[in-house]
Amino acid sequence: MRRTPAGMIIAVTGGARGIGREIARTLAAAGARVAIGDRDLAAAERTAAELPGELAAFPTDVTDTGSFAAFLDAVADRWGPIDVLVNNAGVMWVGPFDEEPESAVRRQLEVNVHGVIRGVRLAAPRMRERGRGQIITIASGASKFAPPGEATYAATKHAVHGYLDAVRAELHGSGVRLSLVLPGVVDTELAAGTATGPVRRLAPAEVGRAVLRVVRRPRFELSVPRRLGFATWLARVLPDPARYRLQRVLVPDQVAAVAGDTTRSAYEDRALTGTDEETR
């Protein structure tokens, strides 16, 4: 059933820049009231002021349950109960698995996995009481294919996929829908210095439009581009040797891509010390 986002109240985490900003832009242009949650409140306020439509900024730390709950409460106090929560905040470290700092591992798990779990645990019960609602999580093609050099990041995205699949079964029939958007490499600071392989680098606006499609017609999973979904399906049914060969063709070696490159240094220094949130 096709729905209209006009008049919906939609909250977006990590919404100040990158993919989150474009999600906010697209949904506001479609008539939704959009709450931008971000650790960087000043950046969120600038985004809310710059984009057309009805938007508001709120301080939000997805690694802190009290902060996340306060975000949802503040949005409800301003506009009413949230119709859609978009779990967008995320961080990524790239490099050889045995050189990854333990602090980077912890930060990715806390933001990418625990942040999503917090959002679901806080928002889904409220939605279930009302008998309707949707939680959309921006995951990654790494939920299905694990690129060399992104071991922990891929692990977080696999974890999110499994968690939401299980919770979806618990919420069946409640009126609460869970959705995953799985993009390939997106042209944001998070992906700086990484390779795209045979698939072109996506614009953040393309992910924004994918989220709008999922709001209009809820489904559990949407790959961007859609042919990425076919590739992941094919990989599941192939025997292991063939799957490995397919993955080597489709999935870029990010260890090789970032070797000797300092492009990511500024982003990783900021994002993995807890002062920034972004997603693929």
Image (cartoon, rainbow, N blue to C red):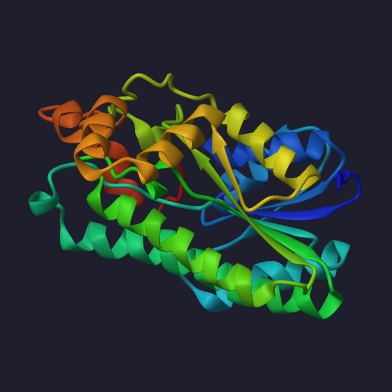
Q: Is residue 257 above or below residue 89?
A: above
In the depicted view, which residue is nearer to us: 117 or 90? 117
Q: Residue 19: name its quadrant.
A: top right
Q: Residue 223: name its quadrant.
A: top right
Q: How many marks?
A: 0
Residue that appears at 34% across and 64% down: 109
Q: x%, y% of residue 40?
A: 52, 52
Q: Is residue 261 above or below residue 147?
A: above
Q: x%, y% of residue 8?
A: 86, 52
Report whether residue 169 is seen. Answer: yes
Residue that appears at 84% across and 64% down: 78
Q: Residue 211: name its quadrant.
A: top right
Report whether residue 62 is seen. Answer: no
Q: Is residue 239 left or right of residue 129?
A: left
In the depicted view, which residue is nearer to us: 100 or 156? 156
Q: x%, y% of residue 147?
A: 26, 40
Residue that appears at 86% across and 43% down: 2
**Which of the image's four quarters has the C terminus?**
top left
